[in-house]
Structure formats: C-alpha cells, structure tokens
Amino acid sequence: MNFKTMIILSTFVSVLFSCTSAEKERWNHPCEAVSKFECHSLGVSLSKLDKTKEALDVFKFNCERNNAGPSCVNAGVESYKEAEIREAIRFYEIGCSLGEGLGCSNRACFLDPTSGCEKVGLTDIKLAQDYYVKGCELREAVSCYNYGLLMRKIGDEDISSKAFAVGCSLGDIDSCNESKGKKASDGFEILKTESQKSKKTRR
C-alpha cells in the first residue's frame, strides 16, 4: 500500500467513524477493499496518529473478519488504552490461538498474580504458566522472560534460568542478564516438557 493510498484510507476511516450508525450502513469498511496485511498497516498508521478508536475499529475488523493474528493483538492493545480490559483479554486470547506469541504473553499477564497487569476476575497461576510457555514456544522472547520471572517467584530457579536462556537466544537482553550460563537448548527442552505436561492436564 503506497503512502497516498494510506492517507486516503486513514481519512476515510476518520470520516466513517464520525458517522451515525444509519450513515455507516451506507458505506463498506475500507478494509474490505484491501488485503489483511494492508488493513493491518492502516491500523498501525492510525495508531501512530493517536487515533485510538479508529485504529481499534480497523484492527477489530481485521481480526474478526480476516483472522489476522497481529491485528488481534493490536486490537487488544488499543482496547487496553480505552480501558476496555475484558475486550483486551478477549483479543489477546484470539491472537494467541492464531499463533501470535505476544498475544499469549499478554493474556498470561492478566492471569499471573505476580505480574503488574490489572486483574479482572480470578488469577490462575497454572493457566498463566501455560500461556507463557505457549508464547515462548512461538518464539516470543518477552513471554520466555515473563515465564522465567514467574517461575523464580514461585521458587523454581532451574526452570526459571532455562526460560531466561531461551529468551536470551531470541535476543532479549534482560533474559540474557538472568540466564546464569544456561544454554538455550536446555531451555527449549524444558519448555517442551512443560508443554506436554500442560496438554496432559487439560485432557
């Protein structure tokens, strides 16, 4: 999508968003005319312009209509900005299910009683672990790091340092500082084991 097209679509979304519900019915959503990748880029552009509501509308459309994982995660981020915590969680869950590691990590944060995320409903440390592990398996470094922090806080230093080792191998500096010489291969092996345990528990 070229710059001129992006400007036209951004303007169109802004106008569309200001319309009444009846007026909106006369228009097609701008993302219906472009690919899901271009739609996502449009949402990113709107977010950079601090047009949170418009960006959320675009990301939400792309997530729900096109199963675009990155847009689901960004819809979660924009929902959080609007203090719509439950909606943010819902979008993170969808993003995670579509293979977006950051969606898994962000979802885990709301379940993790040791994290700084705002809590909505009950926390669940085991489910938080499952989400962190899945995010780490999807090679999202921050998920490995957060899993390491959680395991350290509950007293499992061995798994903690191995999770940090994986995060470090994925380029996360904070994980490297915490890995204590563990090899990434050791970390991936423990993640595989934890994932298998999790699957058995769910049956």
Image: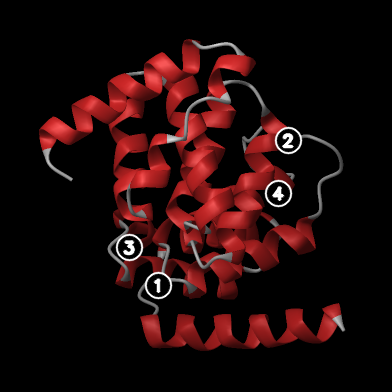
**Which residue is painted at 62% across and 56% down in the image?**
94
**What distance separates the C-alpha of mark 4 from that of mark 2?**
15 Å
- Given contact means CB atoms under 8 Å apart, are the residues at marks 3 and 2 in contact? no
Rendered position, 129 above or below 71: below
Label 1 environment density (alpha carbons within 10 Å; few <14, some 14–19, many ≥20):
many
Mark 4 touches mark 2? (CB < 8 Å): no
Does any portion of residue 114 appear in the rendered image?
no
For disc 1, the marked residue is 165
Q: Which residue is mark 2?
A: 86
**Residue topped by disc 4:** 112
Numbered tag placed on residue 176 in the rendering: 3
Is tag 3's residue or tag 2's residue first in the polypeptide sequence?
2
Residue located at (56% from left, 56% from top): 95
For marks 4 and 1 on the same chain, the one whose residue lies earlier in the sequence? 4
Kind of residue sitting beneath label 3 = Cys
Say which quarter of the image contains residue 104: bottom right
What amino acid is at disc 4? Asp
